[in-house]
Image (cartoon, rainbow, N blue to C red):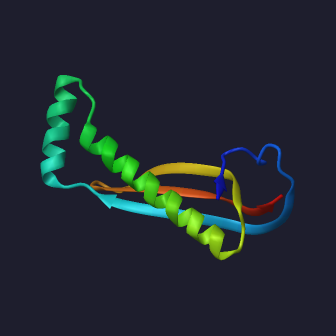
Amino acid sequence: MIITTTQFTEGQTIREYKGIVVGEATMGANIVRDFFVSTTDVSGGRSDAYEQKLADARQIAEAELADEARARVTNAVDGVDLDYEFVCERMLMVSMSGTAVVVA
C-alpha cells in the first residue's frame, strides 16, 4: 500500500478513485507518565514517554487508514492529512485521512 501526502503518487497513473478513507487513534495518558513529563518539562528536556505515545498513535492511525483502503480494493492513498488533537485534558487523538485510489 502506497501512502503519500502528495496529491498524486509520482510515476503512477490514477485509474480509479474509491473515496475518502480515515484512520484514527485516541490515546490516554496516565498519571505516572504525566509526572515524568512535568519533570522533563521543568528541566527543559524532551519527553520520550509522550513522543513514544505519539508514534504509537500515528502507527495505529496509519494501519487503520491502510486497512480501510484495502477493504475498498485499492493500492494507494493520496493526499493524506495528518492531524493531532487533544480530545480532553488527558486524551490525544491522531487522525489521518486521504483519498483511496487504484494506481497503475
Is residue 36 left or right of 55 when viewed as pictured?
A: left
**Above or below, 71 relative to 77:** below
Image quadrant containing the C terminus: bottom right
Position of residue 6 measured from the top left corner of the image (x, y, whole percent): 72, 44
- Closer to the camera in the image, 104 or 69: 104
Is residue 13 left or right of 34 when viewed as pictured?
A: right
| x 69%, y 66%: residue | 20
For residue 10, what is the image quadrant? top right
- Closer to the camera in the image, 79 or 103: 103
Image quadrant containing the N terminus: bottom right
| x 37%, y 48%: residue | 54
Position of residue 42 measured from the top left corner of the image (x, y, whole percent): 17, 27
Residue farthest toward the front in the current orientation of the protein:
104
- Closer to the camera in the image, 104 or 81: 104
Residue farthest toward the top in the current orientation of the protein:
44
For residue 70, what is the image quadrant? bottom right
Position of residue 67 measured from the top left corner of the image (x, y, whole percent): 57, 69
Position of residue 26 measured from the top left corner of the image (x, y, whole percent): 38, 62
Is residue 13 left or right of 77 when viewed as pictured?
A: right
